[in-house]
Image: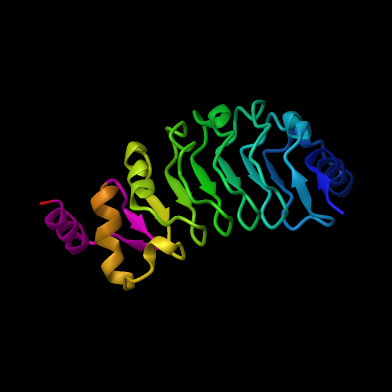
Amino acid sequence: MAIGCAKAIQDWEAKKGQRASEATEIRLCAWNPPINKMDQGLNQLTSCTKLSLSTNSIDKIMNLSNLKNLKIISLGRNIIRKITGLDEVGATLEQLWISYNLIEKLDGIQSCVRLNTLFISNNKIKNWEEVSRLSQLSSLKNLLLAGNPIYEGFTKEDVKPQVIRRCGQIDVLDGTIVSDQVRKLAEEMKD
């Protein structure tokens, strides 16, 4: 059995003794029973700046249009296959935590013009062209990409210049500050 966000939010309010519409942070991680749908119940979260829906059974990002203050959304450990539905929060979203899903392509992320942190490790990204899409996000500085098929065949150190050559704006890659040496290697690869 699974439930939508509306029911989970109702349960959260009862548990916390607080109105969800006034809360700046809503944490519905590993909900029991698991949340399987981002339904219209999310529309009441008008004050929410951080929404945590990790470790559920969500397969599609949707119904974020009223979350005008949303800065951080955590959707790790779900069954999301495609990045969609972020256009509605693209002007405010600064961090997207979406590791351990089934994502192959990064289209749908370009609307997130203020995104500075993207945790998208352990997904299904296997094409360097998808990583190159991230170069359009000039505010993106912190990227967690490890555990994707694209890293197969590379050592931890050898993969860094591959990523930086495509996304030079990144300062922190897979939890480590990008060194001048990595930047130099990435620059040499462009020639």
Q: Quadrant of the N terminus?
A: bottom right
- Residue at the image position 43 percent from the left and 58 percent from the top: 145
- Relative placement, left or right, of 185 versus 100 is left
- Residue at the image position 40 percent from the left and 52 percent from the top: 142
Q: Quadrant of residue 25?
A: top right
Q: Give the residues drawn in magenta, as a range.
A: 169-190
- Relative placement, left or right, of 155 versus 31 is left
Q: Position of residue 33 (x, y in %)?
A: 84, 55
Residue 174 is one of the magenta-drawn residues: yes
On screen, 137 above or below 128? above
- Relative placement, left or right, of 1 versus 145 is right
Q: Position of residue 124 (x, y in %)?
A: 50, 57
- Residue at the image position 28 percent from the left and 70 percent from the top: 157
Residue 175 is one of the magenta-drawn residues: yes
- Residue at the image position 69 percent from the left and 58 percent from the top: 55
Q: Nearer the viewer, residue 143 or 48?
A: 143
On screen, 85 above or below 148? above
